[in-house]
Amino acid sequence: MKTKFYILLMMVLAVFACDDSGGPTANTLTGRGGSLARFAVTETHLYAVEDATMKVYQFMDDGALEKINEVDLGSGAETIYATGQRVFIGKNDGMVAFDITNPANPVYYTSYAHFVSCDPVVVQDTMAYVTLRSSGCRPSGANQLDVVNIKDPMHVSVVGSYALTEPYGLGIDGGLLFVCEGDHGLTLLDVSEPLNAKIIKHYPDYHAYDVIPNHGTLILTGNDGVAQYDYTDKNAMKKLSLIPVAK
């Protein structure tokens, strides 16, 4: 029940990009969900995954959502992440990406397969970062972070793998990658050189399920609820607020 609660919680959280004046504008608003979210928001559309399908909704002028398309994904779709002109779907046996240059009609872009596990995904530039978890999730697999080069969609390849304890959600901001490890805390990695990722700091006292980093401010979900941190000093993050879980 807790897992379902946090997934639902991340679904309703969004961090919005603002213009230089500090205020949101109609042309810059883009929802940012956690890596365990089952929907992704762009300026004009919402994409939702439901096991074997991705449903495409359009924001109408009156603020309503209208379903305009549905894309077959095959079974096992679990998470979705949007960046630029792509959406990336984490499946229990791999990752699949779609081009949304035409947002109403997603077109297959690329994919890669792995052993059966749970696998949230985030993307930056030409690299995808995928956590694979077996504990409490699938009967087989491993617990690790995969770094996947997606520059050439015809030749997607895993360029690095790093052993982890119990990886859940993850988030990226520039060269800083946040990896949640449940009861084992929050791990920060330097991925400014993606082929040579390095652990910067581990916060063992944080229960971490999923994160949304945004220009120095981190939203983190864990057993305590939804917390907000300042990570401008990545070696000494500061808690700013907490929305506790109702007991």
Image (spheres, helix red, strand yellow):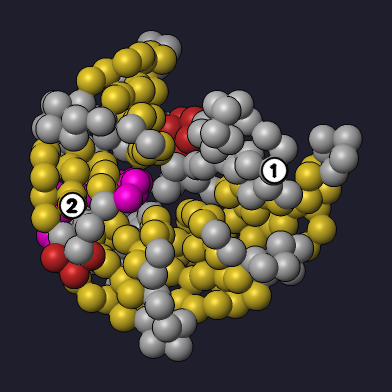
154 shown above or below 225: below
Where, quadrant-wise, is the C terminus in this rendering?
Answer: top left
**Going 76% across and 63% down the picture, which residue do you hit?**
104
Can residue 93 be seen by looking at this rendering?
no
View extreme (top): residue: 247
View extreme (bottom): residue: 154
**Going 45% across and 77% down the picture, which residue do you hit?**
111
Q: Residues within 10 Å of mark 1 (few under 14, many from 20)?
A: few
101 or 212: which is nearer to us? 101
198 or 245: which is nearer to us? 198
Q: Residues within 10 Å of mark 2 (few under 14, many from 20)?
A: some
Can residue 132 be seen by looking at this rendering?
yes
**Going 67% across and 68% down the picture, which residue do you hit?**
101
User: What residue is pinned by disc 2?
Assistant: 190
Q: Amino acid at mark 2?
A: Asp
**Going 68% across and 47% down the picture, which residue do you hit?**
43
Q: Left or right of 210: which side holds 4?
A: right
Where, quadrant-wise, is the N terminus in this rendering?
Answer: top left
Residue 110 percent across, percent down from the top left: 49, 78
Residue 211 percent across, percent down from the top left: 36, 38
Magenta segment, which residues?
A: 161-174
Marked residue nearer the N-terminal end (2 or 1):
1
- Kindly identify which numbered label has been placed on residue 27: 1
Q: Amino acid at mark 1?
A: Asn
In which image quadrant can residue 102 be found? bottom right
